[in-house]
Every structure is written in C-alpha cells, then in structure tokens.
Image: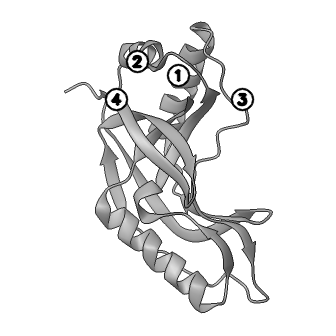
Amino acid sequence: MRLFIAILLEDHMKRALADAQAALRSRQYTGRYSDLLNLHLTLAFIGDHSDPDYILEVMEQLAFQPFDIALNGYIGNFGDILWAGLEHAPALEKYAKQLRHCLAEARIPFDKKNFNPHITLLRNAHSSRTFSDVEIAREHMTVQRISLMRSDFGKHGAAYTELGSAACET
C-alpha cells in the first residue's frame, strides 16, 4: 500500500486554503485541485510498503512537544504545482529531521528530497494569469499528533485514509 506521514490540518486552515483555491479558480486556473478533505502537510513520503504497523511503532517512539505551524499568506510553485507556504517553524523542521532519521534507522524507505514544508493546492496548473497576488489568510494551529496515511487512487483522484497516529507528549 502507498503510505505517507503527515500533519492533518484543522478546519479553519482548510477553509483558508479553500478560499485561496477559489481565488485561483476565479483567475481561470485549471488543473487538479486538491480536495478539501485531502489537504495536509507531508512530513515523509514512504510509497509502497506492506507493514504500516511497523511504521506506526517507529512513529510512536519519537516523542515530541506540541508545536505551532502557520500559513505564511502566500502561494508558491514547483513548476506546475501550486502550493501554500508556511512560516518558518524550527520545531516543525526539527521534528521532520528526527522523523526521517528514525525512518532511516528502522530501514523504512522514504523519499529523501529535502524537506520543504508546503501544502499542495493545485497540480498541473494552467492559466494565462498570475497567482502571485493571491493571498491566503495567515491561519495557524498547534500540532498535537502526526498521522500515517494511506493513499488510494480511484476514478475521481486520490483518497487518503488515516491508518493511525502518534500523539505528542502531554
């Protein structure tokens, strides 16, 4: 099964991102918009792996304190992928680095691209207009759990299912 580790977003953050998607639509941006239910922040993409329970065990061994993340108000892009950026968050970066180290130690393969925190809004984006003036409400949330997600592709795109999570120390 296709797996990834992510931070699931609170509803107020999803609403701010949905408003940004609506602004992109009003600028005639076409492509595959991320479904509101699928908006998340990926910490590590694992890909095909047959033992989610083992991954959850590794995740649960990594203790963390609650930390804040916040939308930075802007849209960026990787080629034809448009995404919402996040404010610099040292605690997020530290956790992602520790998580990836734990995955490597446990010999769980994952995509080793540099961690660049973002939330994908639109894939295969096309428009003759700019997105640089689209602003996103600067919402924030406190991260208290990290989720292991399964990705299934269907007729209407990807569907994500939470298989389990690791909670912060209280």
Q: Which residue type does callout 1 highlight?
A: Gln
* Helix, strand or loop for disc 4: strand
- Whole-percent x and y of residue 89? 49, 46
> Between disc 2 and disc 3, whose residue precedes?
2
Dots 4 and 1: beta carbons under 8 Å?
A: no
- Whole-percent x and y of residue 6? 47, 39
Q: CA distance from mark 4 to mark 1?
A: 19 Å
Q: Is residue 139 visible?
A: no
Q: CA distance from mark 3 to mark 1?
A: 13 Å
> Between disc 1 and disc 2, whose residue precedes?
2
Q: CA distance from mark 2 to mark 3?
A: 19 Å
- Compared across the picture, whether 56 is left or right of 1 comes to left
Dots 1 and 2: beta carbons under 8 Å?
A: yes
The label on residue 112 is 3
Residue extending furthest toward the front: 155
Q: Which residue type does callout 3 highlight?
A: Lys
Dots 3 and 1: beta carbons under 8 Å?
A: no
